[in-house]
Amino acid sequence: MTAPLGAAEAAGRILLDIRRQPALRMPLDDALASVLAEDVVSPLDIPAWTNSAMDGYAARAEDVRGATETVPVRLKVVEHLPAGRFPTRAIAHGECARIYTGAPLPDGADSVIRQEDTDGGSETVTILKDRDAGVNTRKIGEDIRKGSTVLTEGIELGPAQLGVLASLAVANPLVYRRPRVGILGSGDEIVDVDQPEEILTGRKIASSNTHTLVALVRQTGGEPVNLGIAADSRESLREHLGRGSDCDLLVTTAGISVGEHDYVRDVLEELGATHRFWKLRMRPGAPVGFGLLGDVPWIGLPGNPVSTMVTYELFVRPAIRKMMGHRRPFRRSVLARMAEPINLKPKLQHFLRGIVAEGDDGPEARLTGPQGSGILTSMVLANALLVIPEGQHETPVGATVQALVLNDQVYQEQPGF
C-alpha cells in the first residue's frame, strides 16, 4: 500500500492533472471575476483629446496670470462648449470659451479658470484670481496611450478592469471559461434543507456540505452544479455521478474512507476512473482522494463539515483557480506569533482554525476554540488556518507559525503549507 502523502505534495500532484479552461468571448457585464485570456492593447488615446477637468472658462495662462480681485482681467467669451461639443475655433489673446467638465479644450487654451473665481457674463468674463493658470485640464493620453498594453493575460477582471475595457470599446473580452464544478454529497443519514421535519426532529442530518461547497465554488469563480445527495449504494452513486457528465471537475464529500458503506472509490473505478491518491498525512481531512474520470478530475473530500472546508481551501480552490487561468492558485501564507500554546498528540500536519490579528509586534494568532472536525462554527470565527508541522506536538506562546489567510484576495504561486 502506498504511504499517505503530505498536504503540499498532494496539492502539487492535483495541479499537475489540472488543465486551464478554453478561452471564449463573454459579454462585458458577465465577465466579473473571470481571467483575461489575451493582452489588451489600446486602439486609442484616453482621454482622446485634452479636455476640461471642471466647469469654468478655457483661457490662455499668459492672459490670466496676475489677476486679483483688485486687479481683475477681463476676457471676451467667444464660444460655449458643453460636454460633447467640439470647439469651432482657437482661443486668441484676450479671449476665452465658456466650458464644462469633459468638453474638449480649444486650441490656444491651456487653462480652465473655475467659475467661482470669475464674475462672468455671456459675452465677457472677469477673472478675479489666477490660481488656475495652466491647470484644470486633462491631457490627451494622460491615462492610456494608443498602442500601449493596458491589461495583460492572466489578470482577474474586477470592476476597475471592466471599466477600462468599456473605455476601449471592448464589448466581449476574451476570457478563460469558468469551470462547471459538480458537487455530490452522499450518505443515508443526510438530507437537504427541503426536508426540515427530518432535520428538526433529529432523524436526519442536514447536508450543510452541499450548500457550503456551492457557495465556495461560486466564491472562487467556478459554476457550481449540485448533483444532489446519493444514498449509500453503488446504484445511487452511479446515477448521481452520471449527472455530472458535462462538468469540468467533480467534487464529492464523504464515502471515500474504509467504512463498510464507503463506495465512492469503488464506483468511480467501475466507471473507469484512475486514482492518484486517497489518503493524506493531515488533520482534519486525512481521507482525501484524487483521480481522473476520463479526462475529468475528481477530488474526494471528507464528510465532516470542517474537514470539507479545510480540504476545499487546500486542494479544490487552487484547482479551480488554475482552471480559470489564475497564475497564483494558493491562499496567501503569512507568519504569525502564537498568543496561546497549542498541544497536539497525533504525528500529523495540522490545519487549525485560527484568528490572526495585528499585535504590538506584528501578526498574532490564537485558536477559535475547540477544534473538532464537526464544529462548523469554528470556520465562522476563523480568518486563517494555522499550519502546525507534522510531528510538532507542542507550540508554545511566542512561537512563529504559518497562517493561511482566508479573508483576503491575495494569492501566491506555491502552497504555503
Image (cartoon, rainbow, N blue to C red):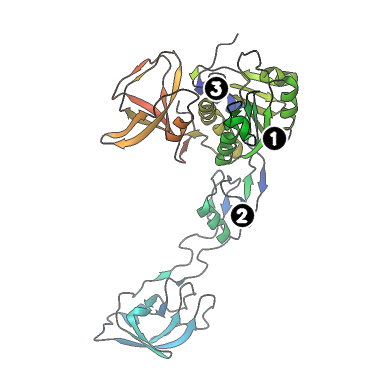
Q: Dividing the picture into quarters, in which one does residue 382 lie?
A: top left
Lower position in the chain sequence, tag 2 or tag 3: 3
User: Which of the marked residues, 1 or 3, is nearer the chain's N terminus?
Assistant: 3
- Provide the residue designation for mark 3: 10
What residue would you read off at disc 1? 247
Label tally: 3
Task: Relative to 178, say whether 54 is above or below.
Answer: below
Which quarter of the rendered picture does the C terminus lie within? top left
Q: Secondary structure at mark 1?
A: loop
Categorize mark 3 by other alpha carbons within 10 Å: few (<14), some (14-19), many (20+). many
Does the residue at mark 2 contact the one at mark 3 (Cβ under 8 Å)?
no
Mark 2 Cα-neighbour bin, 10 Å: few <14, some 14–19, many ≥20: some
Q: Is residue 12 left or right of residue 26?
A: left
Along the horizontal axis of the image, is 245 left or right of 38?
Answer: right
Q: CA distance from mark 2 to mark 3?
A: 36 Å
> Which residue is most to the left?
70
- The answer to whether 155 is drawn above or below residue 205 in the figure is below
Foreground mark, 1 or 3, reads 1
Residue denoted by label 2? 28
Q: Position of residue 181 (x, y in %)?
A: 64, 35
Q: Earlier in the sequence, mark 2 or mark 1?
A: 2
